[in-house]
Amino acid sequence: MAIVVVGLSHHTAPVALREKFAFPEGAIPQALNLMRQSGLAEEGVILSTCNRVEMYLATAAAAADKQSLDAIRKFLQDSRGYSGALSNEFYALSEPHSIEHLFRVACGLDSMVLGETEILGQLKQAYHLALQHKHTGSRLNKVFQRAFNVAKQIRTETQIQRGSISVASVAVELAEKIFSTLGHRHVMVLGAGDTSAKTARALLSRGANSVLVSNRTYENAVALANELGGRAVPFEAWASEFTRIDIVISSTSAPHFILDRARLEPLMKLRKNEPLLLIDIAVPRDIEPEVNFLDNVYLYNIDDLQTIANDYLRQRQEQVAHCENIIREKVHGILAGLGRANPPPLPDASLRLPPSMTIDANEPSVNPPATPAARSSDNAPPLKQPKPIVPPEPPWNAGYQQPTA
């Protein structure tokens, strides 16, 4: 019995295609039932997230050939009612690459955000759904349980999850460095953009006390304030709230500074010079850089945040080789445990096959792509060595080379 993976992901297909293959949770048990009744697989798990749709299957054959992998892919297309043209969007992997891929997915090495942990929870949920409906057996049970153990080991023994790699999480980290705790801190959002909303949510999730929202269109401020459990403030009156605010997230579309040194200086006196964190994620910028010269004012713009994020991402990338070595060792071990007398050697982790290619154990493999600026205020808290966050998401097919004929 061989374990295979057939699917598509953010590496190989844009969201407009991925969404056509996504499974509602309620449709997954029936799809697995039909798959097993068709004779294409004896066990199965379907993982369906915003970034990937994958079928993990244990087939009756000792090794999956191209014909059976193509049949599984066609089943996936038919089950989602897709009749459009496809080229290399699907990948089909057999042992040992299928198991290695599962382990990499569980560890966040195949994610859009390197090292993220949400995918592990999604993978566990997909597995438990299949288990609950009796679509898994001894083979997939063993492989999935091992994948979860490997993910735990990698979290413990490497720094693949070190640091924040999103603008929102970097902002939270800066806030916690300046204020130590967010429990009694108040947040103001200027503008109602998606990134500022995410940042406010992240601060609230870490204990921020309250949030005010101000926008030129008051109705938009009310809508976001309701969503965040906060209070809307008319745009012309936001400065009157400054005496009670500790953190400002600004992301308006104003063509000029809405807060400059001349305006902030008297407001800081009213605040008795309590620390103020300004997160300016607007382009053009909302806040004049000169405010950095004021005592207890800490200004970070979008480039500062991105610098921090990129540095953390580089640190994560440096951990990939260590993670790959752990995965390769565990894959070899589980293949031996599954009865492979002479498990095929795994290819070098630096030579990983693009997922768009169908591979088997005898084919080569190739790896898929897998401090803020100096401040003028001496009071700026030192950033933890190094710095975290996620750069803008790459194009869906960045870093991949399509196979040549």
Image: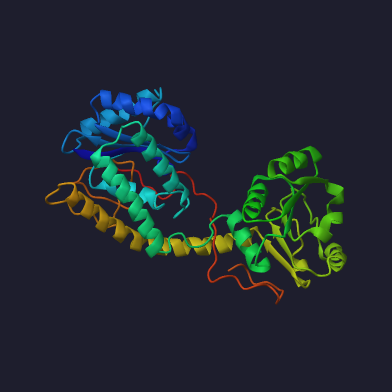
Q: Residue at x 42, y 30 (%)?
A: 21
Residue 364: image location, x then y, percent: 23, 50
What colour scheme governs how the chains and residues are painted in the rendered image of this protein? rainbow
Is residue 353 visible from the viewing direction of this image?
no
- Pick whichever, 271 or 307, lies toward us: 271
Place of residue 371 in the rendered image (x, y in percent of width and height, measured from the top left): 58, 69
> Splitting the image into 4 quarters, where does residue 221 fall?
top right
Can the viewer see residue 7? yes
Report whether 121 appears left or right of 189: left
Above or below, comparing residue 131 to residue 170 in the picture: above
Residue at 85% over, 67% down: 265
- Expressed as whole percent of the image width and height from the top left, the position of residue 145 reads 31, 47
Give the residue at the far left of this rendering: 341
- 135 horizontally vs 162: left or right: left
Say which residue appears at 18% left-offset and 54% top-offset. 345
Q: Nearer the viewer, residue 20 or 1?
A: 1
- In the rendered view, does 54 fall on the left or right side of 94? right
Image: 31 above or below 273: above
> Measured from the top left, where is residue 155 in percent x and y?
41, 59
